[in-house]
Image (tube, rainbow, N blue to C red):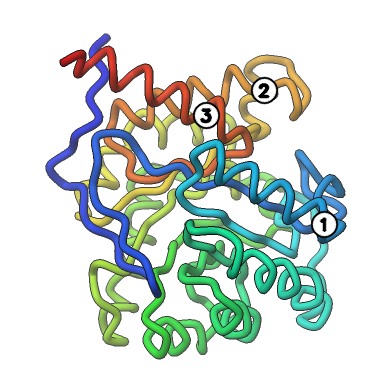
């Protein structure tokens, strides 16, 4: 198998205060869950000092973006209020903004939270609802941040209750294309838009594999593609492994996503992923 990282469709990504230039291997986004109930690491970084320490270590390990989330989106999770979400993420963002030299991303579905997070130091918004909040596009345009548009069928509380598709890859593609056009009509520039097929968000086991096998159909839309499969349930089903024991599966998906030209990989295990990509790049470009 030949691994190919350099895709001609890769684009520059501009966010507020940063630029990510195309490169042979994907950019690595480190996950920072400031929550008590996330599916894989809930509670581990809920205390601010632990969150800051972990984010700092991920940056040292090679993360090029730190994605900070205060509301769990695991299957079956209940939402929280705006004030609670702000109370979780803002102290961490304010502490990291003056400490790290890598971009910060806010993982939120609420424009009110996104606005406060951007004002506190985030340059990217990662929105699992693809800007369903009617004010989200206004925040993106006003502050010039980049945005990740993710596909999710339903809501976290019920998204894994018998999701169905006729053709999952084309349905996901059509949804993302529609959301991209929506943002473009709001005046958002192409170089601020990233698309994410939403692995594990309202998807059956086979759906996740089909999406990953046909990533190039999403790349054909012409926008950077983010893949977030780290420690996801389909890997647990495939490997019969608990979330903390899914590193091998997560790395396999990272290698596969690199082969198909993904632009960003969102992961829990930053050092291991960065090392993997470094070795793959050296093997393909030994000189």
Query: Which secondary structure lies at badge 3?
Result: helix
Task: Name which of mark 3 and mark 1 comes first in the sequence.
Answer: 1
Camera-near label (2 vs 3) is 2
Q: Residue at x 36, y 28 (%)?
A: 213
In-image side of 1 versus 142 (left or right): left
> Residue reaching furthest left?
8
| Quarter in which the C terminus is drawn | top left
Residue 9, image x, y percentages: 16, 47
Residue 88, image x, y percentages: 79, 69
Badge 3 density bin: few <14, some 14–19, many ≥20, Cα 10 Å = few
Nearest the camera: 270 or 85? 270
Query: Which secondary structure lies at badge 2?
Result: loop
* Residue assigned mark 3: 206
Which of the 4 image quadrants contains residue 189? bottom left
In-image side of 34 versus 151 (left or right): right
Q: Above or below — where is 180 with respect to 77?
A: below
Q: So how many labels did they put on this image?
A: 3
Res. 49 mark: 1
Q: Above or below — where is 141 with respect to 129?
A: below
Mark 2 in CB contact with mark 3 (< 8 angstroms): no
Which of the 4 image quadrants contains residue 83? bottom right
* Residue assigned mark 2: 246
Res. 256 mark: none
Badge 1 density bin: few <14, some 14–19, many ≥20, Cα 10 Å = few
Task: Name which of mark 2 and mark 3 comes first in the sequence.
Answer: 3
**Can residue 166 be seen at all in this image of the molecule?**
no
Mark 3 in CB contact with mark 1 (< 8 angstroms): no
């Amino acid at each position: 198998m030949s691994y190919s990282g350099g895709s001609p469709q890769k684009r520059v990504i501009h966010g507020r205060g940063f630029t990510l230039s195309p490169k042979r291997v994907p950019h690595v986004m480190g996950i920072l869950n400031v929550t008590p109930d996330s599916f894989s690491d809930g509670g581990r970084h809920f205390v601010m000092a632990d969150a800051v320490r972990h984010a700092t270590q991920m940056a040292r390990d090679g993360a090029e973006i730190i994605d900070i989330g205060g509301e769990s989106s695991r299957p079956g999770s209940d939402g929280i209020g705006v004030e609670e979400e702000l109370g979780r993420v803002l102290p961490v963002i304010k502490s990291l903004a003056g400490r790290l030299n890598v971009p910060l991303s806010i993982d939120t579905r609420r424009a009110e939270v996104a606005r406060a997070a951007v004002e506190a130091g985030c340059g990217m918004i990662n929105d699992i609802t693809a800007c369903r909040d009617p004010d989200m596009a206004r925040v993106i345009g006003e502050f010039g941040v980049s945005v990740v548009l993710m596909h999710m069928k339903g809501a976290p509380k019920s998204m894994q209750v018998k999701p169905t598709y006729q053709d999952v890859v084309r349905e996901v593609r059509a949804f993302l294309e529609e959301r991209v056009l929506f943002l473009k009509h709001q005046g958002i520039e192409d170089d601020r838009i990233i698309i994410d097929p939403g692995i594990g968000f309202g998807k059956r086991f086979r759906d996740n594999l089909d999406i990953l096998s046909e990533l190039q159909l999403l790349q054909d839309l012409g926008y950077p593609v983010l893949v977030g499969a780290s420690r996801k349930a389909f890997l647990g089903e495939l490997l019969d492994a608990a979330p903390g024991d899914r590193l091998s599966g997560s790395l396999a998906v990272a290698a596969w996503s690199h082969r198909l030209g993904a632009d960003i990989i969102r992961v829990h295990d930053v050092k291991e992923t960065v090392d993997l990509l470094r070795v793959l790049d050296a093997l393909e470009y030994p000189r």
